[in-house]
Amino acid sequence: MTEPMTPLWEVFIRAKAGLAHRHVGSLHAADAEMALQAARDVYTRRGEGVSLWVVPSVAITASDPGDEAALFEPAASKPYRHPTFYPVPKEVGDM
Amino acid sequence: MTTFVMPFDYVLGLADDALVLGHRLSEWCGHAPLLEEELALANIGLDLIGQARALYDHAGALEGKGRDQDTLAYRRDAPAWRNLLLVEQPNGDFAVTIARQFLYSAYAAPFWRAMTASPDANLAGIAASAANETAYHRRHASEWLVRLGDGTAESRRRAQAAIDLLWPYTGEMFAVDGTVTALVADGIAADPAALRAGWDETVAAVLAEATLVRPADGWMQSGGRRGQHSEHLGYILAELQFLQRAYPGGQW
């Protein structure tokens, strides 16, 4: 659906200081400032965050689902890349 | 330390402003032009209704006759309401709703900020959250007004018509009666005259960015604070109060 007056924006929220912004959804708005306000009203009504990003959806370059096998399959056969074969000293605690 | 007793009528007027405007915004529920704006208007309405509830509780306690927030909201006829005429004006088109919100919150945000210094601790507490809420309402309405005014020829025409329509209701925000004068003299309430310059500045800046013309300050409507309302309040109360009038004390 194309809406030239109110293009699509992707919304990212930082839940609290120190955490990364996470994608939470999208919305329609006329420009960046209106998108920011709409994001505040649509996505932070229950104290979800302390910081907002809005990004024009057209600015996102996405991988092609058809390339899934070529892009991601090769990683499946390389379990040694996961740090699961190393005993963690007790003093380290939670990682 | 002196204990201050705010006049019941004064707090009631603030509560009525918040409830009536909140009710007006609730009328947009299901009718807003965008899903995003639907939520924004409902959010703002809920902020205002929340302010009203706290203010009614406080007013009821000051009055000391056992009237709680529901009694005050649901069991008074129009002449007993003390809200500004501005907030009871009909939603009109989206431009009128935005213009009304802008003109009111450009006043309410600095008003509540000033009231955080009130020696009435309850009122100061309510003011602290209301100041943040109305500052956002002002921002929301300002941004919309700029885009409507500086938008298409049609949106500009409607935005200017909305400002012109509501302008005669803006003087009442800064009008003072004997009660307010006494409260200001005692340092208990914010001085409306002192808020005037800031309001003028906000309005001038936003209207300029919106390429809209500030109407001349002619004759101003008044009477809301004395219980003399436009016909519109009666219709609001008919809808707002129907259930409690038909089923007094009904709970859900």
Image: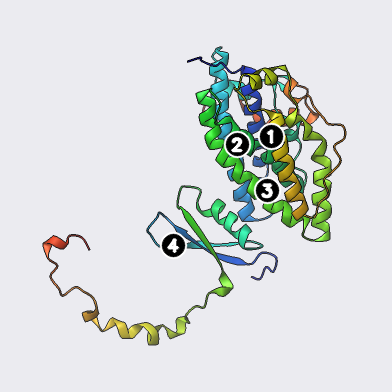
> What's the distance in space between the residues labelled 4 and 1, CA to CA?
39 Å
Residue B208, horizontal then vertical, whole percent: 77, 52
Residue visible at 69% across and 69% down in the picture: A4
Amino acid marked by disc 3: Ala
Residue B97 makes an appearance in the image:
no
**In terms of depth relative to the viewer, which is nearer, A21 or A2?**
A21
Q: Which mark is residue A21?
A: 4
Residue receiving disc 3: B141
> In the figure, B164 relative to B239: above or below?
below
Q: Picture coordinates of residue B221 (x, y %)?
A: 82, 30
- The amino acid type found where label 1 is placed reads Leu
* Residue underneath mark 2: B48
Q: Is residue B230 left or right of residue B18?
A: right
Type of residue at label 2?
Leu
Q: How far apart, in angstroms, are the residues tagged by discs 3 and 2?
A: 14 Å
Q: Are marks 4 and 1 in contact (CB under 8 Å)?
A: no
Alpha-carbon neighbours of circle 4 within 10 Å: few (<14), some, or many (≥20)?
some
Label 1: which residue?
Answer: B195
Q: Amino acid at mark 4?
A: His
| Tags 4 and 2 on a common chain | no
